[in-house]
Image (spheres, rainbow, N blue to C red):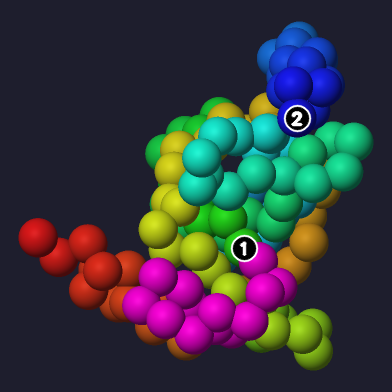
Amino acid sequence: MDNQYDKWNDEKKRIELQDQKFTFKVREIYWLKIGQNIGYEVYGKGDEFLRPVLILRKFSKDSFLGIPLTSQDKDDMFHFKFIPINKTKNNYAILSQVKLFSSKRIKSKLGKISKEDFINLKNKLKELIDL
């Protein structure tokens, strides 16, 4: 396990030094280098610690609020099921893992969510965080 944290630390240093910037928009899905995290925090897989993330809200050209995705079948209040545009496989937005991301973490574009699904996702997220 410690080896994964060491690998992630090296990758994180490379990410910070890169100048690569992506132009991204709300509703788009990207592969992000989200890392090796702790406890129940979702983490990336493979050598680059990648996970698909949906852009929920753009704050600037450098940062956004994102929702990590999974292909694991999850039918509960903490997940939102949808099929990305031009895809055939279900994705599940992990609503409990919403967080701020730097655009430096973006690896490549993966797809997009439909307007209707995006509205439904936002409504489900609002219900989840209603205090």
Of helix, strand and loop, which mostly describes the magenta segment?
Answer: loop
- Residue under the point 74% across and 21% down: 2
Q: Residue furthest front?
A: 1
- Of marks 1 and 2, the one in the foreground: 2
Q: Is residue 104 above or below residue 117?
A: above
Q: Label 1 sits on what residue type?
A: Leu
Residue neighbourhood size for the residue with mark 2, other residues' Cα within 10 Å, grouped as few (<14), some (14–19), many (≥20): few
Quadrant of the rendered structure where residue 126 is? bottom left
In the displayed structure, does residue 130 sit left or right of residue 92? left
Q: Quadrant of the N terminus?
A: top right
Q: Which residues are magenta?
A: 70-82
Confirm whether the magenta stretch covers residue 83: no
The spot of residue 39 in percent (x, y) is 51, 40
- Residue under the point 58% across and 48% down: 42
Q: Is residue 93 above or below residue 68?
A: below
Q: Earlier in the sequence, mark 1 or mark 2?
A: 2
